[in-house]
Image: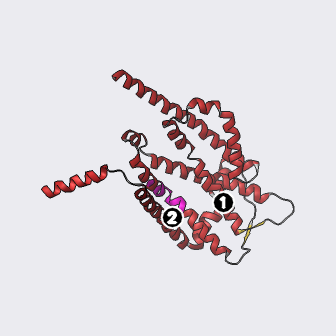
Amino acid sequence: MALDQVDVDNMEEQAGKEMSFLEHLEELRWHLVRSAASVVIFGVLTFLGGKAFFDLIMISPKTEGFFTYRMICKLSETLCFKPPKLDLIAIELGEQFIVHFKFAMMFGIVLSFPYIFWEFWKFIKPGLYDKEQKAARGVVFICSFLFLTGVLFGYYIISPFAITFLGGYDLGAVSTTSLSSYVNYMTMFTLPVGIVFELPIVVYFLSKVGLVTPEFLKSYRRHAFVIILILAAVITPPDVVTQFLIGVPLYFLYEISIIISKRVVAKQEAEEKRLEAEG
């Protein structure tokens, strides 16, 4: 029993010690290694899926049987549209292999994002107070949900309209594009959108630390609208359709962020009044 008690005391003493800078770096390194390993594992599994899986995920948005085209046609015949015939060509030697590898890694990032964020959260969580940890409960699920929602929005909403508009733009030339260009555009339609969909959670934490208030967000609503238009132009091709498709949900998320910030500030003020009353 005495030895057990000594072991417990040693563990408590070690837990109470602050980690050095090098120890923090070492811990961060292992979090990054495990995150990278998860991307590689999912990427390899995706790569092993071969051409069938590549066609299912990457090529489907330019085919008439894609979910978005079929659903819009079912909802309204007047709004029904189809993608243009767009031939994909491999220009450089090894391009098909490189593009397949890039797709596998991209899809690996998407699939492993919840685990990556969980590793990130494990690293920063010990540095937070118990109150802050309780306030951030469920953050991994919420961030993962917002990211995947953004990726799916880009995949099912932005990409079909963008492919139809850009691929169907006619100046008399034959509609062909390189396989690499097509995959790069599809990446641009999805991953950046998933990242910008994290706006509400970012505003939540900035409001918690007092860097952002609902009054600040309201007063700069016009400026935010301009920034959103610029951001939409940066992460999407230079056409009005795709900019509109990403700009509208981004502005909607901005309005949601105002509500979130308002609730955070109101809760903090109520807590301060309660503490003053008890004191």
Q: Is residue 54 above or below residue 250?
A: below
Q: Earlier in the sequence, mark 2 or mark 1?
A: 2
Please identify the dominant SS of the magenta region. helix
* Mark 1: few/some/many CA within 10 Å (<14, 14-19, 20+): many
* Mark 2: few/some/many CA within 10 Å (<14, 14-19, 20+): many
Q: Amino acid at mark 1?
A: Met
Q: Is residue 54 above or below residue 212?
A: below
Q: Which residues are magenta?
A: 108-118
Q: Are marks 2 and 1 in contact (CB under 8 Å)?
A: no
- Residue 77 in view of the camera: no
> Which residue in the structure is indicated by mark 2?
39
Q: Is residue 27 or residue 47 the one in the foreground?
A: 27
Q: Amino acid at mark 2?
A: Val
Asked which secondary structure carries label 1, the reply is helix
- Asked if residue 116 lies in the magenta stretch, the reply is yes
Q: Which residue lies at the image location 47% right of the left edge and 66% below the top edge?
A: 37
Q: Alpha-carbon distance for marks 2 and 1?
A: 19 Å
Asked which secondary structure carries label 2, the reply is helix
Q: Which residue lies at the image location 70% right of the left edge and 51% below the top edge?
A: 234
Q: Which color scheme is applied?
A: secondary structure
* Residue 169 falls left or right of residue 262: right
Q: Position of residue 32 (x, y in %)?
A: 47, 61
The quarter of the displayed image where residue 85 is located: bottom right
Q: Position of residue 248 (x, y in %)?
A: 66, 42
Q: Which mark is residue 186?
A: 1
